[in-house]
Amino acid sequence: MEEILELIKEKSYSKVKKLLADMLIPDVAELLENIEEDTDLIVTFRLLPKSLGAEVFSYISSELQETLVKSLSDKEITYIIEDMYTDDAVDLIDELPANVVEKVLKNSTKETRQLINKLLMYKDNTAGSIMTTEFVDFKSGMTVEKALSRIRRIGKNVETINLLYVTTKERVLQGVLSIRELLLADQEDTVDDLMETNVISVDTSMDQEEIALIFQKYDFLSLPVVDKENRLVGIVTIDDVVDIINEEASDDIAIMNAVAPNDKPYLKTSIWKIWLNRMPWLMLLMISATFTGIIITKNESVLSASAFGIVLTSCIPMLMGTGGNAGGQASATIIRGISLNEISFKDSLIVIWKEIRVAVLLGLSLAVVCFLKLLYIDGLYKMDDGYLVAGVVCLAMFITVLVAKVVGSFLPLIAKKCKLDPAVMASPFITTILDIISLLILCGLTTAILPI
């Protein structure tokens, strides 16, 4: 990689061209991403064989695609768009600015424009928006000989031929068969003899997360997409699903850490965009955290009691931290379960009962350790009512852990039921809520039990 980048800087394009011809497409795309000068980028892209140009183009980032589209000739753009699979072309159109999109569509054929516009009409993040319309299908009754002939004729222009589909004349999906079954069959057999009629398909409106779960469950390489009349309109392929998984995981990680999702790489994102992504969440959490200050102020007489006020105040960070961590553990586990379709809202009572039992064990363990720490490390055994103060703090610890586990496990389920992203109920949000709850528990128990 470094060697080729040096050759590009030295303008040794004849050597670069030879090296590019032997490289794999993802490696070429990575090389283009690392070229700093736009002029070098454009020249290097033009050195690619035409057969590779469109495929490499679909691998690079939208920023590089925009740079190339603005600089390439109309003829070059036409070649790229016409040679791209429709789902990749739609992704390109979706991410480019309007003036660049206009140039792309202007240089597409009428048929390509119609296909792109059709796919753009589907709702974002659904099967219809991510499917490709290039696939191999056979009409019912077709012989193996004719089916193989059809693959030879159109196979080069489709994204995959691993799975093949059988339809009626009205394009209603009837069955699916593999290329292996077709190759091993007799020439006189029909596709009807070989096809599997129990076909798993998805509707054009199905959410992409659900599609990813189907791929994961059945280990599919492709999945047929049908309309309301069960007519085959496209397929979703495994490469699209890998992109979906990465995208959804990135979004969840961002939301779970109180950052708005961003589809651009970190190094290519402006500081203003990062500020905009982070500021609203931090503002919300800061305002929420002011409630802890209000609670401390209202219970100032309790927390400043001469005998044990210092001890209680010093225990506040420990209680708040333990509550936040306990809730964060529960929420992370439940969010993952929801994402993998292992847990749903109907499992709420089972989940809560399980977390309560876990919380009792954890709360007792932490309370015992905390009691010993307060008595013998912090020296409360020397103090009047020291055992009572330690008992109050440990009881607060136990109740805080119990509440934290219930809140941390239940809020993601509520979010899912309300059709929100469960990741919203992750650590920062849960921690802020539990900070308030743990303070209320400590102050309430202190007022009720300790002699003030």
Image: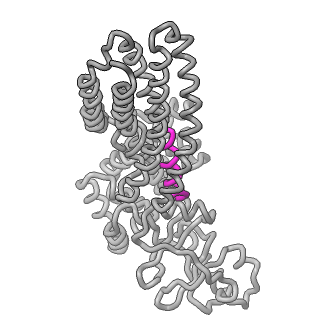
Position in image of residue 162 (x %, y %):
63, 69
- Quadrant placement of the C terminus: top left
Estimate the x, y position of residue 444 in percent, counting from the top left. Answer: 35, 30
Q: Is residue 331 magenta?
A: yes
| Residue 41 seen in the current view | no
Predominant SS of the magenta segment: helix
Q: Is residue 394 magenta?
A: no
- Asked whether, in this view, residue 308 is left or right of residue 215, the answer is left
Q: Which picture quadrant has residue 89?
A: bottom left
Q: Is residue 150 visible?
A: yes
Residue at 49% over, 54% down = 338
Considering depth in this image, is 115 or 405 the residue closer to the camera? 405
Q: Where does the magenta region start and end?
A: 329-343
Seen in the picture, residue 177 relative to 422 is either above or below; the reply is: below
| 211 relative to 326, above or below | below
Along the line of sight, the residue nearer the viewer: 298 or 307: 307
Q: Quadrant of residue 139?
A: bottom right
Above-or-below relation of 139 to 332: below
